[in-house]
Image (tube, helix red, strand yellow):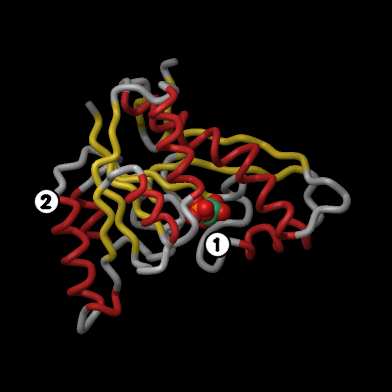
Amino acid sequence: MLKIAVLVSGGGTNLQAILDAIDSGKITNAEVKIVISNNPNAYALKRAENHEIEAVCISPKQFGNREEFHKALLEKLLESKVDLVVLAGFLVAIPPAIVDAFPNKIINIHPSLIPSFCGVGYYGLHVHEAALKRGVKVTGATVHFVDKGTDTGPIILQKAVKIEPDDTPESLQRSVMEKAEWKILPKAINLIANDKITVTDGIVTVND
Ligand code: GRF
């Protein structure tokens, strides 16, 4: 049974997609053990509580400095004895010590087709504003392993979404979430939970 920690900062619709996929059997051999947010007001924490999952706020504001925050976050993850850490809209950079503790065991959902519109500053609506400004006709979402860079780890799954002429950043964000994020994040977790993923020289192979 793959034990999962989900890290969140906002509404938690990706977390909800994971929980619904486990409940419906689309994800097998996995359970969410803990949900951690840096934001005490994240509705994602409420979604976890509604599902009787441990919901914890670990915020930089609770600590004297960043290092103490990083230490507390790592200690909580180790204490939870999870096998996989899922970043589902987590807006805090993951420190190298946590990446080292969970090699190819941290995944992230990013709302673009990496390597487009990713890296420092590309989060939330900024991603979709950039896609519309560039005039791309297709965007989408990417699930990737987390390394010490920003959105630079091995790509696991991607799903494309057509941009409509009347799309706004808000409508495009919703479209990418509904048509891509909420599908490929649960699918990636199911593949990992059932040992269908291998990574060789930074390239992911899906053995489905
Ligand atoms: C999503 O747009 C996701 O792509 C990005 O952050 C947002 C999280 O939304 N990483 P939610 O908290 O899962 O609803």
Identify the image quadrant of the N terminus: top left
Mark 1 lies on a secondary structure that is loop
Residue 80 or residue 43, whichever sits in front:
43
Distance of mark 2 from mark 1, alpha carbons?
29 Å
Residue in view at x 49 percent, y 57 percent? 11
Q: Determine whether, in the image, residue 106 is placed left or right of residue 100.
A: right
Instruction: Give percent across and percent down for residue 88.
Output: 43, 50
Q: Determine whether, in the image, residue 48 is placed left or right of residue 73.
A: right
The numbered mark, 2 or 1, whose residue comes first in the sequence reads 2
Q: Which residue sits furthest bottom?
A: 64
Q: Does label 1 point to a residue whose CB lies under 8 Å from ligand 1?
A: yes
Vertical side of 129 occupied by 183: above or below: above
User: Mark 1 and mark 2 in contact (Cβ < 8 Å)?
Assistant: no
Mark 2 lies on a secondary structure that is helix
Identify the image quadrant of the C terminus: top left
Residue 48 or residue 140, whichever sits in front:
48
Residue in view at x 25 percent, y 76 percent? 66
Disc 2 marks which residue? 79
Q: Nearer the viewer, mark 2 or mark 1?
A: 2
Give the label on residue 123, or none.
1
Residue in view at x 26 percent, y 66 percent? 58
Count neighbours of disc 2 (C-alpha within 10 A) and say few if under 14, some if 14 to 19, many if 20 or more. few
